Image (cartoon, rainbow, N blue to C red):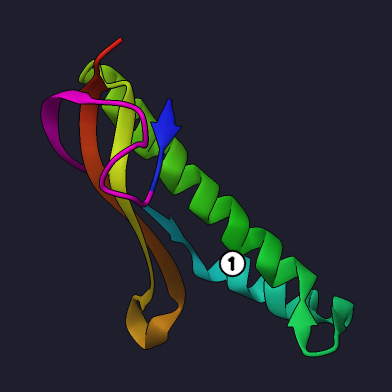
Amino acid sequence: MIVTTTNNIEGRVVSQYLGVISSEVIIGANIFKDILGGLRDVFGGRSGTYERVMEEAKENAIRELQDKARALGADAILGVDLDFETVGGGGTMLMVSASGTAVRLLS
């Protein structure tokens, strides 16, 4: 499945727009405690532990988006947008939201 932030795919023609799809992944407070506990790996102001957790959350949101697109019979997702927000009391959780347009492409 092609997943892109652009509104078209060079050399491909959209045959059908199947609709806007979205997914959300929330990382709970325990993850943040683990991250804070793992700050020993911070070097040069970066935390490899935190970056890995963020990357995993992003990948899970995109994977869920792809699953929804496949269920609609899509070949691609156009205009993908990723948002990261803190949620919950005191911002103790992180939410990653992904959205895009599921489409079918001409063969």
As drawn, is 93 to the left or to the right of 104? right
As drawn, is 66 to the left or to the right of 105? right
Residue most toward the front? 11
Amino acid on which disc 1 is placed: Asn
Q: Nearer the viewer, residue 14 or 52?
A: 14
- Determine which residue is flagged by label 1: 30
- Image quadrant of residue 87? bottom left
- Image quadrant of residue 43? bottom right
In this rendering, is residue 14 above or below 59?
A: above
Give the image location of residue 76, x and y in percent. 33, 29
Element class at badge 1 = helix
Instruction: Residue at 53%, 46% (x, y): give it.
Output: 59
* Quadrant the C terminus occupies: top left
- Image quadrant of residue 96? bottom left
Give the image location of residue 52, x and y in percent. 69, 60
* Quadrant the N terminus occupies: top left
Q: Nearer the viewer, residue 32 or 77?
A: 77
In this rendering, is residue 88 above or below 14?
A: below
Q: Nearer the viewer, residue 9 or 57?
A: 9
Residue 61 covered by magenta stretch: no
In this rendering, is residue 46 above or below 84?
A: below
Instruction: Residue at 60%, 57% (x, y): give it.
Output: 55
Q: Which residues are magenta?
A: 5-22
